[in-house]
Image (cartoon, helix red, strand yellow):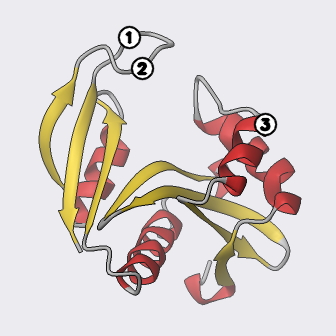
Amino acid sequence: MELNNIETRPMLLADIQEVLVIEEESFGSPWSKNAFISELKNQYAYYLVASIGDKVVGYIGAWLIFDEAHITTLAVAKEYRRQGIATLILEELFKDVRENQINKATLEVRVSNQRARKLYLQEGFVEVGVRKNYYSDNKEDAVIMWKQL
């Protein structure tokens, strides 16, 4: 698959059904429809989708607070993983937020999520700490990561 067939754009309410399918196949404790609706109404939230034609294949969300982007979620549909889409939408987010004088990004990721941690390290994030018992579903620790943009 060619990455130049993929477009990124702001997430719309109309995207939520497709986003929920990806969310449910990606996470043990998926966000609800209402959580995404609430995020799209949040003045500090910034969400993008990656699409091929009119099919949503991935998404990313962040809270933009002062000079920081706190990445809240990132997922790619199972059949489109390991093709560079997560990198593409991360880099699009970075480009967009830099235009708003945001110069740092942070996130938490499950200690066990080696694929995501590897992706973030490749994108220039640094592991700076651990939040103990961060995830409510199983009390797993989260690795705290930061990146200068």
Q: Nearer the viewer, residue 37 or 17?
A: 37
Q: Secondary structure at mark 2?
A: loop
Q: Position of residue 58 (x, y in %)?
A: 63, 60
Q: Amino acid at mark 3?
A: Asn
* Cα distance between the residues tagged 2 and 3: 20 Å
Q: Position of residue 139 (x, y in %)?
A: 38, 10
Q: Residue at 66% across / 33% down in the picture?
A: 31
**Residue 129 quadrant:** top left
Q: Amino acid at mark 1?
A: Lys
Q: Is 57 situated left or right of 98 in this image?
A: right
Which mark's residue is nearer the viewer, 2 or 3?
Answer: 3
Quadrant where the image shows the N terminus? bottom right
Q: Which residue was labeled with disc 2?
A: 135
Q: Residue at 83% across / 59% down in the picture?
A: 13
Q: Is 60 situated left or right of 126 in this image?
A: right
Q: Is residue 140 above or below residue 61?
A: above
Q: Which residue was labeled with disc 3?
A: 34
Disc with the residue nearer the chain's start (2 vs 3)? 3
Q: Nearer the viewer, residue 79 or 126?
A: 126
Badge 1 density bin: few <14, some 14–19, many ≥20, Cα 10 Å = few
* Cα distance between the residues tagged 2 and 1: 5 Å
Q: Nearer the viewer, residue 30 or 76?
A: 30
Badge 3 density bin: few <14, some 14–19, many ≥20, Cα 10 Å = few
Q: Position of residue 97 (x, y in %)?
A: 41, 76
Q: Which mark is residue 139?
A: 1
Are the two marked residues, 2 and 3, in contact with CB atoms closer than 8 angstroms?
no
